Amino acid sequence: MIYIKEPSVSATILRAFQHIDMSGVDIPTRNGAARTVYNAFMETTNPRLRHLALKGRKSNIFQLIAESLWVLSGSGRVTGFLEFFLPRALNYSDDGQTWRGAYGPRLMDTCQLDDVVEAFEQDGLHTRRAIAAIYNPSLDSKAGMQATYGFNQTKDLPCNLLLNFYVQGNRFCCKLIQRSGDALFGAGSINPFEFTLIQELVYSKVRETYPDLELGSFVHDVTNLHVYDAFYSQVGEVLGQRQPAIDADPKRVQEAWIKNTFDDFKDALAVWINAAEDYIAQPNADTYSELVLVATQELLNEVGHKLGSANIVTDYIFIVNQFLITKLGAGEADHTGELYLSAQAPDDLLLALRDSKFSPFKAVYRLGDDNA
């Protein structure tokens, strides 16, 4: 067993790489040889520091943001929006259209996150019933798959199984149980991003009932944490470089919240993603202004956006929109190739955007900075 406790996702993943490199064992898997550690217990004490910024790690911050919003939209369709940001998504699809084990439908279609909020409201701060299940035996067991889909072998058995939300010492925590995690592309990338965002959004709703509640740790419990040999060179590149320091208690804090229920947020996100898919299919100024901008305004209303507010969800939405119009080269937008973040945007987000090898932008600025 390994135990890691760090303030940021970047620091947590760096420590995980060190453990895998020093004490991992090489095992054969159905996807090739992998260097593996067992029972990795990783605690990130400030879940807002979710923006992976490790030198040598070819991380795509744009994909992490887009995929997390896609999950919250309840979608399981990988063609269109998700495929645009994550081209390899189709590699994990059984039917060439969807992820059978996609987290969005599992979490959002049955309003599990709204149920979590309600558990704290009805049972009190120390409820033990605030859970959201991803693995579903009626869908994921061989018998369940055969009955539901007509086959019993899948490319997409959920790696993440359960979310458990709890309060410890007046701090709102989230524990993720994961059977198996790729330390480069899953457990060390999209999973801490999407689930810390979910944790913070749930926290924002629970805090409406308990205003003195503080945001607590994200605890990630992975039975098999590994890096495949085919991609292991990235671990060496990360460990061989001096990594930037991320302030454990940053002065600039940008919170995440939504105005109404998760079900309402899901619906607004779905409309926005559908508009984005229409724009991807037909990138022109009319599609952008008549569909994407209209859907964006409705989504911002659902988020509770106000001019000058410090809601990081607003920045995430604008980043996705600007990525689309910059990559596709059409739409009513400023084509300077520059991305501007709100004045409250945190340092680790700025660093992740500026260092990303996937960025289409010539420069990334934060409003109010000297170079903006």
Image (tube, grey):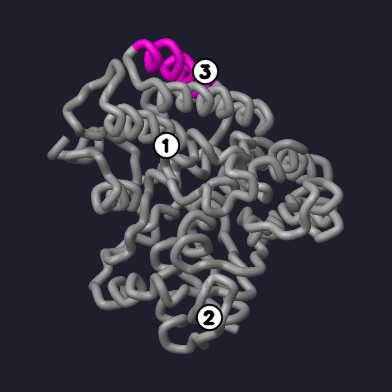
Dot 3 amino acid type = Glu
User: For the residues carrying marks 2 and 1, which lies nearer the camera in this image?
Assistant: 2
Seen from the viewer's position, the closer of residues 228 and 307 is 228
Seen from the viewer's position, the closer of residues 291 and 219 is 291
Residue bearing mark 2: 36
Determine whether, in the image, residue 179 is placed left or right of residue 115: left
Dot 2 amino acid type = Thr
The quarter of the rendered structure image containing the C terminus is: top left
Name the quadrant containing residue 240: bottom left
Question: Element at badge 1?
Answer: helix
Name the residue: 39% across, 70% down: 231
Seen from the viewer's position, the closer of residues 371 and 210 is 371
Determine whether, in the image, residue 279 is placed left or right of residue 259: left
Residue bearing mark 1: 316
- Circles 3 and 1 in contact, beta carbons < 8 Å: no
What separation in Å lies between label 3 and label 2 (alpha carbons)?
Answer: 45 Å
Name the quadrant containing residue 112: top right
What separation in Å lies between label 2 and label 1 (alpha carbons)?
Answer: 33 Å
Dot 1 amino acid type = Tyr
Q: Is residue 70 magenta?
A: no
Q: Which residues are magenta?
A: 286-301
Label 1, residues with CA under 10 Å away: few <14, some 14-19, many ≥20: some
Circle nearer the N terminus (3, 2): 2
Question: Element at badge 2?
Answer: strand
Name the residue: 24% across, 73% down: 241
Q: Which mark is residue 298?
A: 3
What predominant SS class does the magenta segment belong to? helix
Q: Which mark is residue 280?
A: none
Is residue 205 visible to the viewer in this orientation of the structure? Answer: yes
Q: Name the spot of residue 56 as percent of width and height, x first.
A: 28, 66
